[in-house]
Image (cartoon, coloured by chain):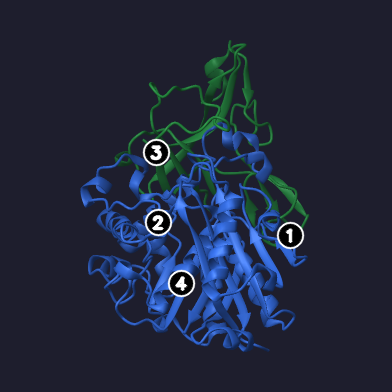
Amino acid sequence: MSQAAGANVPQKSIDPKLFTWPSNKPRLLGSQCNNCGTTSFPAQASCPRCCSEDVETCELGTRGKLWSFTIQGFLPKSPPYAGTETLEDFKPFGVGYVEMPGQVRVVGRINVSSPEELAIGMDMELVFEPFRTDEDGTEIISYAFRPVA
Amino acid sequence: MTDVAIIGIGIHPFGRTDGVSGLEQGAFAVRQALKDCGMDWGDMQFAYGGSSAAGNADALVNQLGLTGLQFVNVANGCATGGSALQSAYMAIKSGMFDVGVAVGFDKHPRGAFAVEPEKMGLGKWYGDVGLALTTQFFAMKIQKYMHDYGITDDTLVKVAEKNYANGALCPHAWRKTALTYEQIAESPMISHPLRKYMFCSPAEGGCAIILASVEKAKQLTSHPLFLKAAVVRTRHFGSFEVFTQGQALDQAPSPSVDASQATFEMAGIGPKDIQVAQLQDTESGAEIMHMAENGFCADGDQEKWIQEGYTKIDGKLPVNTDGGCLANGEPVGASGLRQVYEVCVQLRGEGGERQVQNNPKVGYTHVYGAPGLSGCTVISR
């Protein structure tokens, strides 16, 4: 999904450093180390592997294989959780790591509610979509994964 | 260099003790340990103490006595107790002191540990979208492990069943009721594949261990135990830890592997020599993975080990004989010291109903936790 879907609704990224936004082809942002080649996520100012400060921001892939997963079965404590569900309408959500080939395994929510819909090694793709809506009607955009249809 | 002996052990029962502060539970444990070896607080030359949520450990002097001893507060995440013990070990080993105490206590509020992502450098978004939960990490680590090594859901249930059964035999345990297989297997799914009764909870408790040089110990007791090794290690780049946002493609072994290998090297023995072990069981899967990370079996062999009952009290390597974290809860400052306490009880043959029957001479402890560190010991008699 891109911002086109909500053309008339104001939208805002959940964190401007996390992915390119607004964009027709949004991408997650990581760091590429020019010293040892390691890719990290999210973008940071130095390399967690070799400590080099010679790193640059890079775009991550949008498809990869599911490395591991779980299903968040209960409403997370708020704060820090900012979702607007209640105990009554909470629906379990997936969480997993998706391996971006040659880059890094990225953690994120997965748009499924049941473990039967997931399997380690399956192909996943990235989606950008509203996570919640602010009081003033602004949609807060975050990223998630879903199984490739 | 001198060798290090354990001469006194004390514990305040774990669980919930309304009306008694964490600090008071720590003081209780120290008094028990002093009584155990017939010493006075005034004999203690130093103390290392820690608590994550119940105050500054050095405030214990207000209750135990303002004797002027060297008291150092220790804060090292979930390995705080293990780190206090390791510091005390070095204090004796160096020859600077010949008797002192390691103490830990805690009193956590009910419910899951509170997490503040920004304080951990994680970015507010991470907590906002519902990823800042330690339970997710443990679930995803065992999910991957079960996939790779053929561990079954049935085995997850059996580990929890064993630990609650052991807790039911242990006076200091919090949960003293054994749970049936069905109660565990049908409890609510918290974070697939882990269910409610497969997780430990934050709790309360206190524990104290008095160490002495072997020379000093021989003057005080005819049957000291020996702390043969005490090691703490932290994570390397690429090990899979709690709150990892981007996991490296090249996976490094966990800090438990490092700590365990260093511990066995220091003790001059191997995993096959261990007769009773306490391994971090934040949840059922953790105990299973830690059996291999600490060198007791190969990856995947746990399935057979658990199904055959090898880690039960009457098995060939009893694990978590006091019920572990599942039956005791996890007061962070005290948890690692409880494991040491339990091994000492077993080596002394004082375990009562939960006493292992192989007349153990060598035991092992392993504590692991956020943000990715492990502490291990070898204790012998």
Task: Say which residue label 2 marks.
Answer: B173
Which callout, 4 or 3, points to the residue nearer the camera? 4
Q: CA distance from mark 4 to mark 3?
A: 36 Å
> Looking at the image, do the residues carrying marks 2 and 3 touch, with CB atoms under 8 Å apart?
no
Residue A98 rendering spot, x and y as whole percentages? 48, 46
Helix, strand or loop for disc 2 = loop
For chain B, give the colour.
blue
Residue in view at x 68 percent, y 81 percent: B98
Q: What is the C-alpha distance between the residues marked 4 and 1?
A: 29 Å
| SS type, badge 4 | loop
Q: Which numbered marker is on residue B56?
A: none
Q: Which residue is mark 3?
A: A147
> Residue at position x 61%, y 15% from top?
A138
Amino acid type shown at disc 3: Pro
Asked if marks 3 and 1 touch (Cβ < 8 Å), the reply is no
Q: Which residue is mark 1?
A: A51
Percent across and percent down for residue B178 are 27, 53
| Vertical arrangement, residue A73 with respect to residue B173, above or below | above
Q: Quadrant of residue B170?
A: bottom left
Establish whether labels 4 and 3 are both on one chain: no
Q: Are marks 2 and 1 on the same chain?
A: no
The answer to which quarter of the image holds residue B279 is bottom left
Q: Are marks 2 and 3 on the same chain?
A: no
Q: As drawn, is B62 to the left or to the right of B261?
A: right
